[in-house]
Amino acid sequence: MPVRKVNKFDIIKQALNLFRTQGYHRTTMANIGTACGLLKGSIYHYFTSKEDLMRSVLEVLREHYREKVFVYAYDEQLNSEEKLKLLGEKCIDVFANGEGACLMANIAMETNNVVPEFRKPIKGFFDDWVDALTHIYRERYSDDAALFFARESVCAIEGAAMMMRIYNDKNYLLKAHEMIMGKFEKASKEALMS
Amino acid sequence: MPVRKVNKFDIIKQALNLFRTQGYHRTTMANIGTACGLLKGSIYHYFTSKEDLMRSVLEVLREHYREKVFVYAYDEQLNSEEKLKLLGEKCIDVFANGEGACLMANIAMETNNVVPEFRKPIKGFFDDWVDALTHIYRERYSDDAALFFARESVCAIEGAAMMMRIYNDKNYLLKAHEMIMGKFEKASKEALMS
Amino acid sequence: MPVRKVNKFDIIKQALNLFRTQGYHRTTMANIGTACGLLKGSIYHYFTSKEDLMRSVLEVLREHYREKVFVYAYDEQLNSEEKLKLLGEKCIDVFANGEGACLMANIAMETNNVVPEFRKPIKGFFDDWVDALTHIYRERYSDDAALFFARESVCAIEGAAMMMRIYNDKNYLLKAHEMIMGKFEKASKEALMS
Amino acid sequence: MPVRKVNKFDIIKQALNLFRTQGYHRTTMANIGTACGLLKGSIYHYFTSKEDLMRSVLEVLREHYREKVFVYAYDEQLNSEEKLKLLGEKCIDVFANGEGACLMANIAMETNNVVPEFRKPIKGFFDDWVDALTHIYRERYSDDAALFFARESVCAIEGAAMMMRIYNDKNYLLKAHEMIMGKFEKASKEALMS
DNA sequence: GATGAATGAGACTTCATTCAT
DNA sequence: GATGAATGAAGTCTCATTCAT
């Protein structure tokens, strides 16, 4: 009964969810099919292979972050604190959501050096993130320091996301966010004092 | 004719290396066998299953860290800075070595929520690590603050290990270590001043 | 809205070409569709199945040979040499054309004893061919001998077509044709002498 | 129950038979397994892929002909007629055996231009055959003529094998053999007369 | 008539695991 | 203890075919 049941994006969403929670290798095409109400074979109507699907997932995810999260860093209606706060909160939302964790990091760990195709979008995502933070930090730090702290912040969040997963405790993410905010505010005061 | 080619530990060592670099699912029993000069079937003389082998790997790794790394936190011949420095350097050695990365984190990401058996040794490892750092930090912080900073430090290192892998750049790990050391030394001065 | 993009014959022509060059099993309905500017599903408006399509291809091919090639054997405007020459040349044209080879022989090899439906048109084609040659040969040989040499000629041509394909060398076909012509001309002289 | 059921050669023999009668694409690994009393997966213990198996089949077949058939062409205990007779008879045996036909030709037609890997052993086989016949023919013909007639003979036999298959009539092969023998004997007499 | 979505059987292949030798 | 043969479940992918629109 060939009635349209899904579209490409539905599949991507379901796959994203499964990849995030089960990992790439433990997620089968049948799993993804079931999640969409399709048979495994039908997914090949939309994607040429599992890798192709994953590539799309990574691209969509990157795009999502770029347009819905990192974009706040460049919204000049907001002041720096607000930007940083929004970025952090959005990340927490996404990461801590459901079985959570950062798919980009997961996939990087699970397939890096093994499926080189995935490296580009993953790197791209982290580039976007670091760029966004650097843009914010430049308002209070030198260019070098801004880049440095941006990287440090990403490390802190990603490390926290991992610990959250291991200990099943969302607090790690919240604390990391607070730490980043606190540091930034302190920089502000120091800037004022100097 | 019982010819002994390897022992349990040999297999664990090879498996550890493969799991670390290729991940759990992409490492086959045949891969491990080859690395040991055995056929895959022979591994079952030592371990009842792949999961069983992984469990052993995780336990051995935890033990290794406990005895060879975290132990310095409790070596009262050393002062606090020295302890912290040693811990960091040892971690960098192991993580940044070869194809590197932190197996515990990798496996956590790849199998958490899926192979619950692995959660205990992984959690245990991070507990040990946090405990060791907390022990050091207590010398300059309150109990609560020590625990808090210990967790933060582990997040920082693990996040850096991940970024190191993604960007293929060992600097992340070094910077994270420096940051932790710097923060601790600063705490020392503040303590002196107060 | 009934838009007619192709007709049955278009599909047959494209399918013939693909079956000839790729073989029956390696040619997919999608391949055929693409070659016609259709989607694979649309072919089922014209043919009930792949086998049905192949049957039509074989029939059309047989008809083509009967009307456009073997017909010369019965054209009494021509003398025997001319008939034989024309038949041979036409066959060479078709067989050696493009990726060439004799579809009838290909399909016979690939599907004989497996898709019995195809045997009839294939046999029919070779019957036609042998009949045509026998008709020509009768002018210089006894009925028995004519039949015998007709079969021998077909063997020679088909064997040559196969070697042409294996060695990618059209000469085999030309030499076979020459051989057949030469033998026939010699028969003529002997007949004259006797 | 891992008791040795087959060896590599058993599998090759069964596969050869199936490929010859069913063709390459219609023969599944499961078919081959069943024919050997194995499960399909077990064949991968001996061959890395279906293509790998086919390659072995082609190599074994070529070797078989070289050692058991074409070898007579170089056996100087025999006179020319005997050599040619033996070669022909052996070929008839093999080709007409069972569901018969020449696997080399079958595969050439079914996979040529598609699985280039198979071209080498197939070409090699026909080279061996032509070489053997050329060697015999040189005793009564010039080098050029010997090569020419050798090729012609192979064409005749292969064409006959195909017709045998289509008409399910072994006579084609016998007649082709007789024709070749007759021609050769006639050459002998002409040589004597001149 | 044409399309595109969906199906489902079945293909090749992988791999953890078992077990007789 | 080690091997090599075999297993069987499961995975990715293909493809002829169906059918609502």
Image (cartoon, coloured by chain):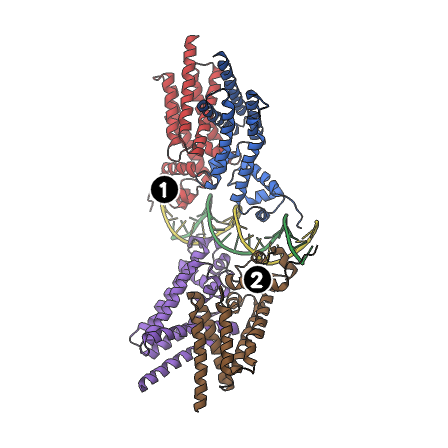
Chain colours: A purple, B brown, C red, D blue, E yellow, F green
Observer-nearest of A101 and A17: A101
Task: Pick out the residue farthest to the top.
Answer: C194
- Amino acid residing under circle 1: Cys
The percent position of residue D107, horizontal first and vertical second, equals 49, 36
Residue B125: which quarter of the image? bottom right
Is residue A5 visible to us here? Answer: no
- Amino acid residing under circle 2: Gln
Q: Residue C36 carries which label?
A: 1
Is residue C39 visible to us here? Answer: yes
Q: Nearer the viewer, mark 1 or mark 2?
A: 2
Q: Do the residues labelled 1 and 2 touch (CB within 8 Å)?
A: no
- Up/down of C29 relative to B169, above or below: above
Observer-nearest of A57 and B110: B110
The percent position of residue A70, horizontal first and vertical second, equals 35, 70
Q: Distance between the residues labelled 1 and 2?
A: 56 Å
Q: What element carries label 2?
A: helix
The percent position of residue C188, horizontal first and vertical second, equals 41, 13
Q: Residue B14 carries which label?
A: 2
Q: Dot 1: few (<14), some (14–19), or many (≥20) neighbours within 10 Å? A: many
Residue at the spot 50% in from the left edge and 29% down from the top edge: D131
